[in-house]
Amino acid sequence: MPGTNLTREEAQQRASVVSTGTYDVALDLTIGDERFGSVTTLRFEATPGSSTFVDLVDADISAITLNGTSIDPALYAESRIPIEDLAAENELVVEATLPYSHSGEGLHRFVDPADGKVYLYTQFEVPDARRVFTTFEQPDLKAEFTFHVTAPAHWQVVSNSPSPEPVVEGEHGTWHFPETKRMSTYITALVAGDYEVVRDTYSGEYGDIPLGVFCRQSLVEHLDADDIFLITKQGFAFFEGAFEMAYPFGKYDQLFVPEYNMGAMENAGCVTFRDEMIFRSRQTVAAYEGRANTILHEMAHMWFGDLVTMKWWDDLWLNESFAEFAAHHSSVEATRFTDAWTGFTNARKNWAYRQDQLPSTHPIAADNYDLHAVEANFDGITYAKGASTLKQLVAWVGEKDFFAGLRAYFAKHAYGNTTLQDLLTELEASSGRELGSWSQEWLQTSGVNTLRATFEVDGDGAFTSFAVEQSAHPDYPTLRRHRIAIGLYDLVDGRLVRRERIETDVRGERTEITELVDHRQPDLILLNDDDLTYAKIRLDERSFDTLLGHIASFEDSLPRALAWGAAWDMTRDAELKGSDFVALVLAGVGTETDLTAVASLLRQGSSAVNLYTAEADRPPLAEQWESGLSGLLDAAEPGSDHQLALARAYAAAASTPEKVQSLLDGALEGLTVDTDLRWTLLTALARIDAVGEAEIAAELERDNTISGQEHAAAARAIRPDAEAKAAAWRAVAVEKSTPNETRRQTALAFQVSGQGDLLEPYVDAYLQMAETIIEEQGVWIGQVALVYLFPLANPSARTLEKVDTWLESTQSGPAAKRYVLEGRDDLARALRAQSQ
Ligand SMILES: [Zn+2]
């Protein structure tokens, strides 16, 4: 039975008999708080006499009419309405009501606890437009859409087309939107409610684009629309120039919405973002850089994804990797975030390397044979490895030819659907390079290569030979062609300065680099300098010694990012002791200029202590980490980003309440104790049982917002208290009614290092829950529970044994098994590192 699934084969079959024309969708948002009305009129062409089906999930259908003849609504089953004996031209009308969603999928409805205002938004990717209207839910059946929305007359109602003036009758209004451009169902959208809006206009080479930024009324005081518009305009100037093509969808609204499951979504002309990106408390520059990156990512999708769309989800990676590549590239070229690729190296690539070394790894071009497979693949490979590989492709064909190929691709396929091959064809034409074998070795295979330098040096310290050796995990033996740079760095007056950079192709097990023969051995050799390729790198002994003493001495942030990455990677691979990594972080984090690196190093340092260090060695290292952070915090410049980042990290490491309490009392000069930092500090106190339910409830009274509720839920879940743990467990893994972001924040706070005894019962409970949760609660809730509640925080051989026993005997489906297997790999890795 299909349930809500749809296979690629079914989609192909349907596209072979049907081609869509237009949807006319009337939605009534005034019939109550639980459900809304949905009437779809779908006009389409078909092979005469053929049969197929349309999609609709969870509907209560009152009438179905096909070409004037009614169809019995009782035939609606398994989220499908069968339609038979089609004519050449068809008109299908489906009248139904559907439930509002509280999981962030379909039409989500939210009531703001701060003021009781109502906010709605849709989220349709991958297959959820069918939770709002009747569809052919597959990306290659593009159509034009006309929406009519009836809602309270004072609301803002926004969709892909410009919002018209509503036709008002009493308290209600109806917005008759103009027809959209031709697009896929998954990028259509509706946002409605008591939203506030700020408007502006981008005036560029191809004319004006009306801009809007929307958020909840209770967030308006924190909305910095100027910065959002600045990045938006810089983005349009860059993309319209680079693509030599006007923005295709008329106006451009960006809507910051509550309880959003993802970062953002590229609905054509109607982009939704999680509203945590409206910062209500002080954030470091990394948060602004991240938000700019997200704005640019979604904007890039307007051309790549929305204008030209993948035929099926097999090319999801290409869609996402391109947007990720384009976001970083345009950040560097067009905004103040000129070191954006450093942030990519410091955060996104570590995500990719981790994912690619899990037993669940898969080729970038995954075989997404059905919707369930697609949903599991929104991962570090699809996004970050794909983007790294695209960056490598740009290095391989050259930036100029890459963009020339893109322009030809957009011009040729505008408003259509494509596969990877269509892009490769244009890139081969523009670059003159054959890309079939490149695509085969990079996109169709799994795993990450490791590169290391080997060389010999004569009596004068000059290289007599130099080679790059490449290796691969035996399970994924593909050795690839890599375009890389090699940097030679010397210590000059206390700075690590690049003396020389060469760019070269590496292939096979060993590549001789004759260019470097006779060159003097530097203090540090950096493979993959400038981060052109995707590979783990190892440092030779002398380079590593230089690094240990001088990581803070690199002149630029990008080589330092590569060095940090190598050190972290070696720690995870049990080649570097956790204590050495901690010492390295404490030596370098205070002067690290990339705030994305600061945040991830502080997280990694904590993991090095709690996961990658043997139990017997942990107490002194934990003390060193805590006091090191305390010292760095005291030394940080008052009011600086470092001070804020270190205060958060110190709070997470603190084992006694005094200093945390004094921070909370505002005792540290320059550290503004605002709403979110108060929660961070209070949560630290809750973790060590210095405050309890009464203090958490009092704090929630001060901050009775949805963010406050989420913070309070996390503070409760982190407490070393059996009842609090039991309640948190129920909220995440049992109760259906927990709001989605509250569930996630609770789950994130549940597993705590040092609470091993208290958490012991939740090893068995986890494995029992894993057996059924996806079937009972669906993929989204199941994923949150299975990923964040995995018993990793207190690694033990006993837990590993139990997990292995479960894996041998489980009856659960492939998705649950995948998440448990990934947690198992992290656990085994931690135990390996601990035993070194
Ligand atoms: Zn994207």
Image (tube, rainbow, N blue to C red):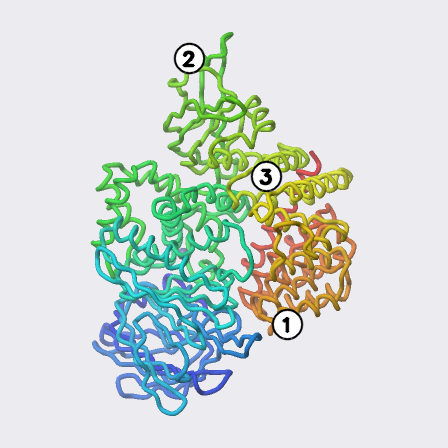
Considering depth in this image, is 525 or 225 the residue closer to the camera?
225
Single out the mark in the foreground, 1 or 3. 3
**Label 3 beta carbon less than 8 Å to ligand 1:** no
Report x, y in % for residue 166: 33, 83
Is residue 307 shown left or right of residue 62? left
> Which residue: 74% across, 48% down?
798
Mark 1 vs mark 2, CA separation in Å: 68 Å
Q: Is residue 546 above or below residue 202?
A: above
Residue ranking furthest to the top = 459
Which of pointers 1 and 2 indicates the residue nearer the eye? 2
Q: Nearer the viewer, mark 3 or mark 2?
A: 3
Marked residue nearer the N-terminal end (1 or 3): 3
Question: Which residue does the numbered mark 2 point to in the structure image?
Answer: 518
Earlier along the polypeptide chain: callout 3 or callout 2?
2
Q: Secondary structure beneath disc 1?
A: loop
Image coordinates for residue 568, horizontal then vertical, percent: 58, 38
Determine crowd level at label 3: few under 14, some 14-19, many 20+ residues with C-alpha closer than 10 A. many
Mark 3 — residue?
589
Q: CA distance from mark 1 to mark 3?
A: 41 Å
Please name whichever residue, 163 or 354, is drawn nearer the observer in this view of the structure: 163
Residue 530: % across, % down:
42, 34
The residue lying at 73 percent from left, 55 percent from top is 661
Is residue 464 shown above or below 794?
A: above
Q: Which residue is mark 1?
A: 735
The CA span between labels 3 and 2 is: 36 Å
Crowdedness of circle 1 by 10 Å Cα count: few (<14), some, many (20+)? few
| Quadrant location, the C terminus | top right
Disc 1 residue type (three-letter):
Glu
